[in-house]
Amino acid sequence: MRHPGDPVLALSLRPRRTWRTVKSWLMSVAMAGAFVLISLPLLAILWALFSKGASVAFSHFPAFFTKEIPVVSRRPGPGMGPAILGTLLVTGGATLIAVPLGILGAVYLHEYGGKSRFARLVRFMAMVMTGVPSIVMGLFVYVVWTMKYGYSAFGGALGLACLMLPVVIGSTETMLRLVPNQMREASLALGATKARTILTVVLPAAAPGIISGALLAVARAAGETAPLLFALGAATSYNPHFFDQANTALSVQIFGNAMSSFTAAQDRAWGAALTLVLLTFLVTLVARIFTARFKR
Amino acid sequence: MDLRGKRAYADTAFRWLVIGAASLVLLILAYIAVSMTGRALPVLQHMGVLEFIKSKRWSPADQLFGALPFIWGTLFTAAIAVAIAVPISLGVALFVTQIAPRRWRMPIVYVMDLLAVVPSVVFGLWGVMVLSQHFHLGRSFMTAGIILAIMITPIITSLAREVIETTPQNEKEAALALGATKWEMIKGAVWPHSKGGLVGAVMLGLGRAMGETIAVALVIGSSLGQITLHALSPGNSMPAVIANEWGEADDLHKSALIALAVLLFVITIAVNLVANAIVQRSIARSRGK
């Protein structure tokens, strides 16, 4: 029986539930499932890092971050201090080498080269260089540096710098592209030279983006192991000298201790891993803050 | 009249400075190729290039260096990784761009970025201490493949997102206006536009998987010379054998490891070049229309 309020026609804009809509729904659920599936290992890794690493790294704070590494690896107890210093030295050195050169290279590509043949070649080769495996960079540095001058933090920094350079070039060029052309034209019209325009107008305008891109490259480099494996040698005590003597780094220590069968060494690997991950996440977080500032 | 005035010299100097910085990329790549090939020559003369690539026996004590088992290990683990990572990456990329509400996007992208910054040695540590022990996988091709899959998923996902987002909005709206469900819209509008670029994204992930060293070195098991399809048996890959054997290697052995690196360099660059050409062409095509 019809009631006064019922529609005359059964016209509804909501699609009827058919096999097609059910299938679409099922596929959407599968896609969401893919995200859940890939989040699981991330959660498992973070859980393992904190459950196994935190007690090692933070008991008797700050002993783990300051004490030297035990020479006999099966002996329990703290010490990753020299590796933390080594990571900071190597990554800092690589940053000082690769970031200025990368920014200058990107300035050439975007402000001078443009679409010229040489600029296209450099852009193409920078892309090729991002694909070079890190172990190849490690052997390259061993062949051209370590074989002649011996182990040092500088050798490790060279390897990391080779990995960072094309990444910094790429991210900086993207950021330079976002600087409006009117700013360059205004500066040139006021009589500034091209170099002055770039240094005082274009680069400052793009600075937050460039810094954010560079920091992401630094975060990646800080976690690299392969380029350091052959250049640093082995050390268990502090070595603040950048150009002399064998050194060590967190990633190298994790690699060495992960292959050990002694529980004490494995514990130190987890503590070092937690330290390294916190360090890289911190750098990434700072990079994100810069990105947010640039977008606004 | 010279409008640039007396600062012209500084300007020219700056120009040469940036050209020099840009040329550095070419110099380094050329230097890598020349210096590494030079160091690889002794073993290539000792074995012969063809024999080095196709011989199955790697026995440094007998001065026999056949790289085939490691080439196989590299390809096999990378193939496992890609087979696992592709459906997951495409699922996440489609979910983020087409299905999820707008306010979910940033958190999802953030989780993927987090996964991308975890150092590879930490993946390796987790793989050898947790994954290989608690899931009865042991140190094997399979464990290496799973770890590699987790590592390349964020890379493939972010490239796939970029490619998928080049689908013109009006074609998607047209599909929906004709009564297509979201899945039909993806099949009919998004897929034809992005399949070329997606192939390229997957190949870039493949290149990354083949070059990964430390995580694989920890979990693959470092056996000598297994050419098998049995995924749960221990194996070895080109980068892993370099990392694991370098410490005890004598001169000819080192030369053989460098030759492996040269081979890896050539293979990964070839994969990357093809992948990049595919991605660029697909993005350019969808922009051009």
Image: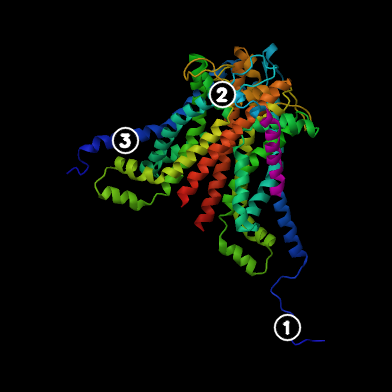
Give the numbered dot on residue A228: 2
Amino acid carrying label 2: it is Leu
Looking at the image, can residue B166 be seen?
yes
What separation in Å lies between label 2 and label 1 (alpha carbons)?
75 Å
Examine the image and state in which quarter residue B24 appears.
top left
Task: Answer left or right for B21 relative to A68.
Answer: left
| Disc 1: which residue | A7
The chain ID associated with circle 2 is A
Amino acid carrying label 3: it is Phe
Do the residues marked 2 and 3 share a common chain?
A: no
Q: Position of residue B28 (x, y in %)?
A: 47, 28
The chain ID associated with circle 1 is A
| Residue A52 magenta | yes
Relative vertical location of residue A207 with respect to residue A180 in this rendering, above or below? above
Q: Neighbour class for label 3 at 10 Å: few (<14), some, many (≥20)?
A: some
What separation in Å lies between label 2 and label 3 (alpha carbons)?
33 Å
The chain ID associated with circle 3 is B
Task: Answer left or right for B61 relative to B265.
Answer: right
Give the numbered dot on residue A104: none
Q: Earlier in the sequence, mark 2 or mark 1?
A: 1
What separation in Å lies between label 1 and label 3 (alpha carbons)?
77 Å
Examine the image and state in which quarter residue A104 appears.
top left
Q: Secondary structure at mark 3?
A: helix
Segment colored magenta: A34-55
